[in-house]
Image (cartoon, rainbow, N blue to C red):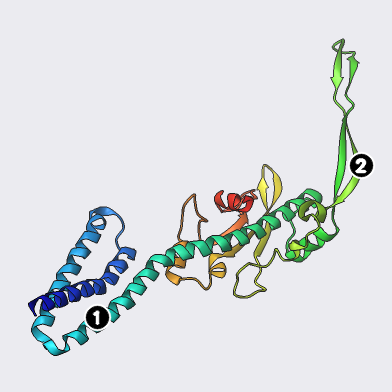
Amino acid sequence: MKHVKQKFNLVLSLVTVFLLLPALAIAQKSEGVRGGFFDTIKTPLIVILAIAVAIGLLFLVEKIVPRKIRPIVAIVFMLASVFFGYKIYNSIMAPVEFKQEKIKRYTAVINNLKDIRDSQLAHKTITGTYAKDFASLEKFIDTAQFAIVEKRDSSYTEFDKVYKIDKLKEVVIIDTLSFEPVIDSLFKGSDRYKRMKFVPFAKNEKETFKMETKTLPVSGYEAPVFKVSVAKDIVLHDQNKDLLRQEKRIMSVDEVDGDEIFVGSLDKVSDSGNWPTSYEIIQKK
C-alpha cells in the first residue's frame, strides 16, 4: 500500500511540474527583460520555483484532498498536463512555422517587386522618367521597344596647325539596327507583368503595391526616383499577432528590416530593395 502511495505521489509531482511548464515558456518569451545577469539566471530560477511549488502542491493535496478522490484529482491533472503540453508544443513550433510561412510569402512579394523594378528601369531608360502608376507601366510594357544599336569607332588623326603635330579625333557613330519589344526583353512572352501589381497572399486579392514617384535635386539635376512598397501587416495578415509585432521591429542584415517590404527610395537615387541576399539565393534555387 505504501508503494502504491509513493507511485501516486511521484505521478502527481510530475504532472504538477508539467502544469507549471507553461509559466516557464511564457517567461522565456517575455520581452520585459533584455540582457543582463537576471536574464541569464531566469530559466534556472523558474525551474527551481516550479519544483518548489510542485512539492508544496503535493503536500497540500496529501493533507486536504480525501484519499478516495485523489485518483480523480490525478486524472484531472493528467488531462490538464496534456492540454498544456500541447500548448507548449505550439509555443515552440509557432516561431518555426511562422518563419517558414514568412519566407514563402516574402519570396513571392520580392519576386513581384523585382519585376516592377525592372519595368520601371526600362521605362526610365526609354522615356527618362519613371511610370507614376501601374496602368501606365503596363501600357508601356505592351507597346514600348528597345532600340538595338551598334557603335562604330570612326576616330582619325588630323594635323594640328597650331601645335604642328597629328592629333587624334575621337568619333563614335551610333547606328540603330532594329527594335526589340520591352515585353520580350523583360518577360520573354510571359504575361506575369499584368499580375505583378497585386500583393501575393493579401487578404484582398485585389490589394496592390503602393507606388510613388518624384524628383530629387542631384548636382543641379532633377533626378527621378521611385518607391514601391507593401506593409508586412498586409502580407502576414493571418499570422500570429505577437510574432508579427516582433517581425515589424526587426533590424538585421539577415532579415527584411522594418514594417514594410520595398524597392527604391524617395530620399535618394536608389533601385535597391530592403531584403537580404538570402532571398536572391532562394530565387536562384
Residue 212 lies, in percent from the top left, at: 66, 61
Q: At 14% from the left edge and 89% from the top edge, which residue is drawn?
A: 68
Q: At 91% from the left edge and 42% from the top edge, which residue is drawn?
A: 177
Q: At 59% from the left edge and 75% from the top edge, which residue is drawn?
A: 203
Residue 36 vs 197, above or below: the answer is above
Identify which residue, 29 or 171, lies in the foreground.
29
Quarter assignment of residue 206:
bottom right
Q: Is 189 on the left-hand or right-hand side of 242?
A: right
Q: Is residue 248 visible?
A: no
Q: Is 197 on the left-hand or right-hand side of 90?
A: right
Q: Secondary structure at mark 1?
A: helix
Q: Tell whether label 2 touches label 1 (CB within 8 Å).
A: no
Extreme-top residue of the structure:
164
Say which amino acid is labelled 2: Leu
Q: At 50% from the left edge and 54% from the top edge, which residue is drawn?
A: 255
Say which amino acid is labelled 1: Phe
Residue 169 vs 41, above or below: the answer is above
Q: Secondary structure at mark 2?
A: strand
Identify which residue, 49 or 193, lies in the foreground.
49
Residue that mark 2 sits on: 177
Residue 248 lies, in percent from the top left, at: 48, 63
Residue 41 vs 150, above or below: the answer is below
Question: In the rendering, which numbered label is found on residue 77?
Answer: 1
Q: Is 248 on the left-hand or right-hand side of 191?
A: left
* Camera-nearest label, 1 or 2: 1
Distance from the alpha carbon under mark 1 to that under mark 2: 83 Å
